[in-house]
Amino acid sequence: MSKSPKLDEKRPGRLFVLSVALNGYAEQSLNLLLSLFLLDIALTFQVSVGAASQVVMISSVASIFVGLLMGALSVRFSHKSLLLAGAAIIVVGVLGCFFAPNFTFMQIFYPLDGVGSVIVIAMGSALFGRLLPLENRAKAMGWLVASGTLAYVIGSPLASLIAGPSSWRYVLLWFFLPISIAGLILAYFNIPSTPREQQDAIGKETYLSSFKQVLRNRSAAACLLVTTLFVVAGIWPIYAMTFYRTRFSVSLEYASLILVAMTLVYAIGSISGGQLVNKFGRQRLAIMGCGLSTVVRMIFIFMPYLWIVLPLDIISATLGGIGMAAAYNLVLEQVPQARGTMMSLTQMSGALGAIIGVVIGGIILDKFTSFTVNGPVLDPNGFLILVPALGIFGIASITANYLFMKDPCRK
């Protein structure tokens, strides 16, 4: 069990968790944009839906390299400074996507959101682990997991409203950019810095040591595998609104309301998961929540009616939020001496999973895409192949969690 924050470290203030969580909110900006406006972005740049979704793969490739780099930098530099750098990178990514004149520029700037996300989530989690007592970390992590999904709750209806009279680009300028800047400013003033003398005392050998502590720990190493597998299955939200718009002819406005509902229940699940972790255990709750979420999704995709699919999707999202909050807390406690490295490598593993998931999604959906004079047209039957294919990875992740991982906080 990890120790409480050291006495020589400045105690975090009341806005500490909020400051980290707001940046967790901001890092979902471009993911929300792609989820809600994937069809519109594809039409804007005259590419297929599968091709448009591949920006996620490029973002994930960049995230892998940044995750490795952060595993080392988190040992040497202040976690606060790194988090601020990640928040600034997100701002640049939002601006770049707004001004992108073609899909090539979109492919350049969209990945900056992924880069910033790796830094923000990894360093925010490490700061929670370092500055908060054990009994408070689970709740804080629940809010961090929920913060990204709350971006959809608030952002989806506003994005739809803003995009209505203009285009998806102005959602970036009038909503996502101010939120990203606000998160950066709030973090600067409310997140305590790591004492300089502790950073200066670190030698070069510590870089390699931090990686060894993670990779030589069987449970911690298993976390990386489990994360990769589950993120493959969890890539579904990228395609979910496109599924509703093509399978059930749902309008953009109605799709935004569905997205609000899904993300709201996911956020509620995440917050609830943070509350339940100390009672039921990190590993047990992660397995139950993530496992049941995957199974329910693999069932509802074959249902023929919206009134059946939607409630089951809501149940799946709620269970997924509970499971992910527990999973993040489980990862955070694996190697207390190298939390920055552990969380950075976990984000890297998640990025690898996103690459695999988007490649699978792109290949399958492209086979069900035809081009007409009005642009690309997607056959919704492609989702009947896609979701079971992704679900196999989700089941594999739960199996690996059960067999190879352990909860350090439970005897």
Image (cartoon, rainbow, N blue to C red):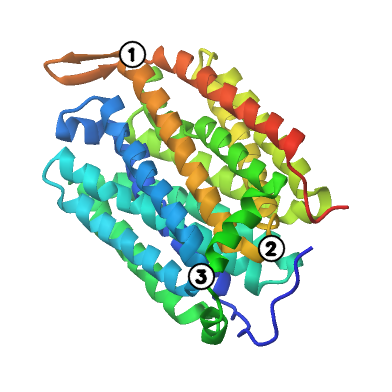
Q: Kindly report which numbered mark, 1 or 3, lies closer to the viewer in this rendering.
A: 3
Dot 1 or dot 3, earlier in sequence? 3
Residue 345 place in picture, x, y as percent: 53, 51
SS under mark 3: loop
- Badge 1 is on which residue? 379
Quadrant assignment, res 396: top right
Q: Amino acid at mark 3?
A: Lys
Q: Nearer the viewer, residue 326 or 112?
A: 112
- Can you say whether 218 is above or below 292 in the image? below
Q: Amino acid at mark 2?
A: Pro
Residue shown at 40% from the left, 19% from the top: 248
Query: What distance separates the C-alpha of mark 3 from that of mark 2?
Result: 20 Å
- Verify CB contact (< 8 Å) between mark 3 and mark 2: no
Q: How many marks?
A: 3
Quadrant assignment, res 206: bottom right
Residue 159 place in picture, x, y as percent: 32, 48
SS under mark 1: loop
Task: Give the number of the disc on residue 336.
Answer: 2
Residue shown at 46% from the left, 19% from the top: 386
SS under mark 2: helix
Dot 3 or dot 2, earlier in sequence? 3
Query: What distance separates the C-alpha of mark 1 from that of mark 3?
Result: 55 Å
Quarter the N terminus occupies: bottom right
- Badge 3 is on which residue? 204
Query: What distance separates the C-alpha of mark 2 from that of mark 1?
Result: 48 Å
Residue 19 place in picture, x, y as percent: 49, 70
Q: Nearer the viewer, residue 252 or 40?
A: 40
Task: Give the number of the disc on residue 321.
Answer: none
